[in-house]
Image: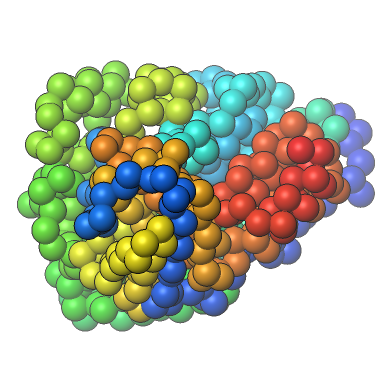
Amino acid sequence: MYKGEKNPENGGNPSTNHEVNKPGYLYPFAKEARGAEAEITIMLASDSDAKEDLQVSVPPLKYNKSLLFMLTQDDCKQSAFSMTWAAINGKPIDISNPTRKYYYDMENLEADDFPPSVYSLGKTLGSTDGFGNEIRFHFTTTLAPEWDFMNVATSVRPGFTENYYRFYMKSGLRWNNVREILNTGNGLAFHDLKTTSIHNLDSLLKHFEIAQKITMDALGDRGVKFLAEPNGNKTYLSAAMRYSDIQTMTAQAGALKLIPYQVSTDLNKTTLSRVFTNTVGEVKTIVTNELAVEPKNRTAIHIGVHETDHEWAQFLLWLNDYYGKDGEDLIWVPSQEEYYEYNYYRQHADVQINRVGTEIKIKVKFPSHKNFYFPALTLNIPGIKKHMIKSISSNDQITGLSYGDFGDGIGINIDCRKFLYDHANHYVKRYLSKRSDSNLADALYHVQALKDSPSKIDLLKLLGE
């Protein structure tokens, strides 16, 4: 593993080589809201002809999308950050010349220290919340907590072009890369464990505990509840069934083929099916074939991948342009743990609606559960349209809210992440300290996630909006 030029070529100055491994910003996941009690108040116009007997329901997929697509990247690959994450978030990506692939880390990104042949897709990739607000694609990266390479320093040398050793592939992701991946809504999974007894149940259980402790120490008590089965080893799944922290799994064989519109359980301790393909073209075929099926019978698409390159970036661009925010906007791309939480809330949240005259009260009591980080739901209310609404407000438990017409009624998206404002403020400050188009897009994206409020208006003013 390369750790910096000890003998710079062509007279390079060693004093300009900075090894960096200081922990970066991380959303305070460990302090996330549990058991949130959300309340929405809708005031109708006095001449509204909304139905008297209103019902509320939670759709099978967030944002009322009709196709679920998930991507899990195995083996804790550095390209999960500098290719997969970077492509989705509009950051520079390497052209991926087969003779020399380059990679970079979070610290390089912050310093504008990039490989020589990077390019940009020119936009961020995602779908919308159904009402025009961007929701970027999310994915899962697996971790290797027991291996030391996640702790190595990285070399940052902006402007140094005599060699590019610092951009050679490392053994895998570093914790700072993982922090930013998490900050932008993606998920984590366990994969390989550092034991030679890979078919010994007790050894795997012991190492799950070790890996979880290392992860929580590195990520401010942010735990992992998802296992991506390594190498078809079913002993990992058996151990996961006995390890309480792991609540959802994925495997290539012997797993449930998920049909979201037909799910009636919370999927706890259920192993969901995924597939590995030989080419990106095969994934496109899977997508188009599934879209030919009626939504109620569509199987979720879950793709496993190891290394990603610019072809994968172009595939994600294709997904955005045809079925995401710049296309039909029918796809939801979460991590498996985000989907698992949404479905769990769908099954167990207490959702009530009550109308008295022109006032409608909606209450949602989220269940309290360990290592849950995505307290959000979509609610559908038939019989009322947006033009009938005089005002809509919510209690402090709700930090993000959007709504609009859907079908024969309205849809409402609520987000109860406790530190959503602080999170948006962090990205605003990042932009103000380093003004770039990409940083501005990030800041606006995170501010847009907030519900309307004077605080949101103030942040937008700081951004010149």
Residue 390: image location, x then y, percent = 51, 49
Residue 120, compared with residue 51, is above or below; it is: above
Residue lying at 71% horizontally and 24% vertically, measured from the top left: 116
In the image: residue 84, left or right of residue 371: right
Residue 192 visible in the current orientation: no
Drawn side of residue 71 relative to residue 302, left or right: right
Vertical order, 107 against 279 (above or below): below
Relative to the observer, which residue lies in front, 160 or 177? 177
Q: Nearer the viewer, residue 38 or 462?
A: 38
Whether residue 460 can be seen here: yes
Question: Which part of the image, by quadrant, shows the C terminus?
Answer: top right
In x, y percent, where is residue 230?
26, 54
Q: Residue at x 80, y 45 (%)?
A: 461
Q: Write down the quadrant of residue 342 in the picture.
A: bottom left
- Residue under the point 61% across and 45% down: 448
- Residue closest to the eye, 307 or 442: 442
User: Left or right: where does residue 329 sit relative to residue 268?
Assistant: right
- Whole-percent x and y of residue 336? 32, 53
Q: Residue at x 63, y 33 (%)?
A: 91
Q: In this image, 18 relative to 226: left or right?
A: right
Residue 463: give x, y in percent of width and height.
Answer: 79, 42
